[in-house]
């Protein structure tokens, strides 16, 4: 990517996108409602699609436009819709009560991880301009927040959302540092992500159906 600063229009859009993506990850970490997990993830993915579209416009790269469209369609719409229908509504998931830490402690740990990401990925270590020096620590913080969500949440669906947030953080850093990938690699990454999501979705649904209690009356019939 060309050297960009936060003062340039493209750099300002990408910088604002990165901050909003980080805030959506923190909001997801501070919530206990399954529906809001998916809402914040969908919002984060839409912002990621905007970042990819901005990079495509700046670089005049058709492959990046395809990548932005795939991000919006798959991550911004298809995955949240499928998870909401097949997991949240089908399994009647409302409030996530399984957590190893309270919301206040979780947010404190998340804030500490954001500070650690900035210190670990200091601007002086990056030679890709002021924009990358500002965005890459944010993308690293998003990855760490997704990992924290997987650790503190006990429910499989919440851990799945944490894993997807981690992937969004990696994607944001890749867009900022390297704006051009071979299209076949980009499509392969998306299909790997979608396949992994469908596998985890099937495993979660099947496990939930196995451990769910039998309907009233059925146990008497079986006995």
Image: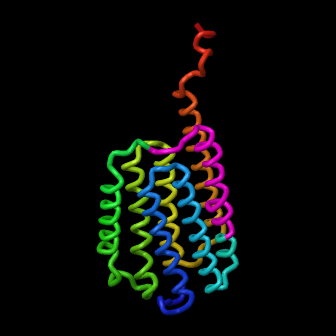
Q: Quadrant of residue 26?
A: bottom left
Which secondary structure type mostly characterizes the magenta part of the structure?
Answer: helix
Q: Quadrant of residue 205?
A: top right
Q: Is residue 111 above or below residue 153?
A: below
Magenta residues span 69-96
Q: Nearer the viewer, residue 105 or 81?
A: 105
Whether 73 is among the magenta residues is yes
Quarter of the image with the N terminus in it: bottom right
Q: Quadrant of residue 210?
A: top right
Total marks drawn? 0
Q: Residue 203: x, y in percent? A: 56, 38
Q: Residue 37: x, y in percent? A: 52, 54
Q: Residue 46: x, y in percent? A: 60, 68
Quarter of the image with the C terminus in it: top right
Q: Is residue 99 above or below residue 214?
A: below
Residue at image position (65%, 70%) is 67
Whether 58 is among the magenta residues is no
């Amino acid at each position: 990517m060309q050297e960009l600063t936060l003062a340039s229009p493209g750099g300002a859009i990408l910088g604002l996108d990165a901050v909003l993506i980080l805030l959506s990850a923190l909001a997801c970490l501070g919530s206990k409602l399954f529906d809001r997990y998916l809402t914040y993830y969908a919002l984060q993915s839409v912002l990621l699609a905007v970042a990819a579209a901005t990079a495509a416009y700046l670089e005049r790269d058709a492959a990046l436009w395809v990548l932005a469209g795939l991000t919006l369609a798959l991550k911004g719409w298809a995955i949240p819709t499928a998870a909401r229908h097949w997991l949240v509504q089908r399994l009647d998931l409302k409030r996530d009560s399984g957590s190893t830490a309270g919301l206040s402690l979780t947010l404190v740990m998340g804030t500490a991880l954001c500070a650690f990401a900035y210190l670990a990925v200091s601007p002086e270590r990056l030679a890709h301009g002021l924009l990358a020096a500002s965005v890459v620590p944010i993308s690293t913080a998003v990855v760490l927040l997704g990992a924290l969500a997987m650790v503190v949440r006990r429910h499989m669906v919440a851990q799945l959302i944490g894993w997807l947030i981690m992937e969004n953080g990696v994607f944001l850093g890749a867009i900022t540092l390297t704006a051009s990938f071979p299209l076949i690699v980009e499509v392969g990454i998306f299909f790997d992500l979608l396949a992994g999501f469908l596998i985890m979705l099937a495993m979660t649904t099947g496990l939930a159906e196995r451990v769910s209690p039998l309907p009233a009356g059925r146990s008497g019939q079986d006995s």
